[in-house]
Amino acid sequence: RVGLGAKGLVTLEQERGTLVAVRGSLHGARDIPLDLRARGSDELGWDVRVELGVVGRERPRLELRPDPRVEPGQHSPLITTRHRVVGDTRTLEIYDEGLFDALARFPDHRARFWDAGVSVELGRDLAALDPDALEELITQLARAC
């Protein structure tokens, strides 16, 4: 199980919808900062974002962008969803296959990787979102930091 040192759950009801946020750190060999945010609105549904580590301000070294024109595996056999790889595809090789399996549960996710952090927007298709899927994703993302 993921050891989470959260400073608390914050829920805000706003005119444009609801915001749920958890900030804290993952406990393990080293503490890894975690920021989990979910925004809900009647019109758009839920927008869920997970950030771990230190997310840079510069361009990420690697990005996975949803693209319906891309065939699964077109850029790499590790990518089993319709995503364009932006950056050096050889960078994919440093990550564990389990990370891409965890991301594949969210077929229209957008993932960005920096040297010390990662940011993932889960996309609109949240059918696979449950506590186990979220825990597996966070565990795999922590390994990538």
Image: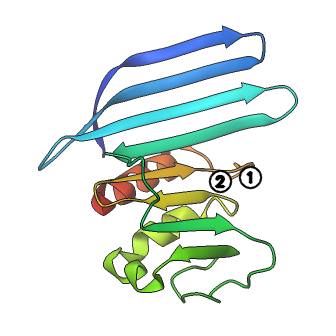
Residue 116 or residue 19, whichever sits in front: 116
Name the quadrant containing residue 31. Answer: top left
Question: Which residue matches tag 2?
Answer: 128
Residue 49 or residue 28, whichever sits in front: 49
Q: Residue shown at 35%/74% (left/top)?
A: 95
x and y percent of residue 62 in the render? 46, 69
Position of 45 compared to 79: left or right?
right
x and y percent of residue 5 in the render? 26, 29
Residue count near mark 2 (Cα–Cα under 10 Å), binned few <14, some 14–19, many ≥20: few
Residue farthest to the left? 29
Q: Which element type, helix, strand or loop, lies under badge 1?
A: loop
Colour option used: rainbow
Residue 112 or residue 105, whichever sits in front: 112
Residue farthest to the right? 43
- Is residue 40 positioned above or below 51 on the image? above
Question: Which residue matches tag 1?
Answer: 125
Amino acid type of the residue that numbered disc 1 sits on in the rendered structure: Asp
Q: Which mark is residue 20?
A: none
- Are circles 2 and 1 on residues that touch, CB within 8 Å? yes
* Distance from the alpha carbon under mark 2 to that under mark 1: 8 Å
Q: Residue shown at 54%/89% (left/top)?
A: 77
Residue count near mark 1 (Cα–Cα under 10 Å), binned few <14, some 14–19, many ≥20: some
Q: Residue shown at 47%/50% (left/top)?
A: 119
Name the quadrant containing residue 130. Answer: top right
x and y percent of residue 4 in the render? 29, 34
x and y percent of residue 109 in the render? 63, 58
Amino acid type of the residue that numbered disc 2 sits on in the rendered structure: Ala
Position of 89 compared to 54: left or right?
right
